Amino acid sequence: MTAHKSGDPTTLNRLYGRQSGHKLRPGQQQLVDDLLPALTVPETGPITAEGLFGYDRPLHFEIGFGGGEHMA
């Protein structure tokens, strides 16, 4: 597959997700600025439930989005 070349009708520009959009409202930006650092996963050290959430329990991860009903 080749990258999209402007003016070349034989290539497609496929973008899945947002390329650009409106700016965040002030309240949304404040949440990103204040809460996001506390929600990030540490770059070093072990990743444990206790380290992430403050208590130890089994972790179950859903990778992707939804319950998989949109997967082919």
Image: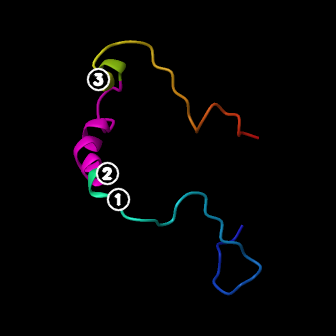
Q: Which mark is residue 51?
A: 3
Q: Position of residue 67 (x, y in %)?
A: 63, 31
Instruction: Pick whichever, 21 or 17, lies toward us.
Output: 21
Residue ID for mark 2: 28
Circles 1 and 2: CB atoms closer than 8 Å: yes
For the point 36% across and 20% down, which residue is it?
49
Whether residue 42 is in magenta: the answer is: yes
Tag 3 or tag 2, which sits nearer the N-term? 2
For the point 51% across and 26% down, which residue is it?
61
Judged by depth in the image, the label closer to the viewer, 2 or 3, is 2
Residue ID for mark 1: 24
Q: Is residue 7 left or right of residue 34?
A: right
Q: Amino acid at mark 3?
A: Gly
In which quadrant will I find the C terminus? top right
Q: Position of residue 25 (x, y in %)?
A: 32, 58
Cα gap from disc 1 to disc 2, whole angstroms: 6 Å
Q: Position of residue 32 (x, y in %)?
A: 29, 48
Q: Position of residue 60 (x, y in %)?
A: 51, 21
In which quadrant will I find the N terminus? bottom right
Q: Residues within 10 Å of mark 1 (few under 14, many from 20)?
A: few
